[in-house]
Amino acid sequence: MQIWSNGFYKSPEHKVIVNEHTRRISIGVFFNPKLEAEIGPADSLINSENSPQFNTITLDKYLKEFFSRKLAVKTYLEHMRTEKF
């Protein structure tokens, strides 16, 4: 979501906090685009005042690169940025 929104919506770190007094609800959301689909900021969010913060690549390349990296917090998200901060 952070890539598609060009940084407007932030991707939160996945963190589970157990509460013994209330029930926890989990909702799975699945989206299955074609491997040729492009992952990148939405064109409607890019203009002269808002340059793209993330590179655009195909889903196939994104998945291959994402799963070939060691697990680290948001490592691949930062890898996708147009400028490294």
Image: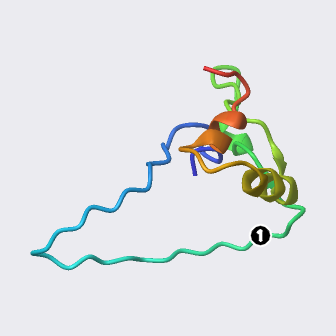
Colour option used: rainbow
Which residue lies most toward the right here?
36
At x 67%, y 30%, the residue is 53
At x 70%, y 45%, the residue is 42
The residue type indicated by label 1 comes to: Pro
Q: Give the vertical position of 22 relative to 54 (above or below).
A: below
- Left or right of 28: which side holds 39? right
Q: Give the vertical position of 63 relative to 51 (above or below).
A: below
- Where residue 20 sits, quadrant-wise, is bottom left
* Residue situated in front as seen by the camera: 17 or 45: 17
Element carrying mark 1: loop
* Residue situated in front as seen by the camera: 56 or 21: 21
Rendering coords of residue 16 (x, y %) = 33, 62
Rendering coords of residue 17 (x, y %) = 26, 61
Q: Give the vertical position of 11 relative to 49 (above or below).
A: below
- Left or right of 71: which side holds 82? right
Which residue lies most toward the front here?
70
Q: Give the vertical position of 69 relative to 26 (above or below).
A: above
- Where residue 56 sits, quadrant-wise, is top right
Which residue lies most toward the left here?
21
- Where residue 15 sits, quadrant-wise, is bottom left
Rendering coords of residue 30 (x, y %) = 60, 75
Rendering coords of residue 52 (x, y %) = 71, 30
Circle 1 residue: 33
* Residue situated in front as seen by the camera: 39 or 78: 78
At x 67%, y 43%, the residue is 76
The quarter of the image holding the C terminus is top right
Q: Residues within 10 Å of mark 1 (few under 14, many from 20)?
A: few
At x 49%, y 44%, the residue is 9
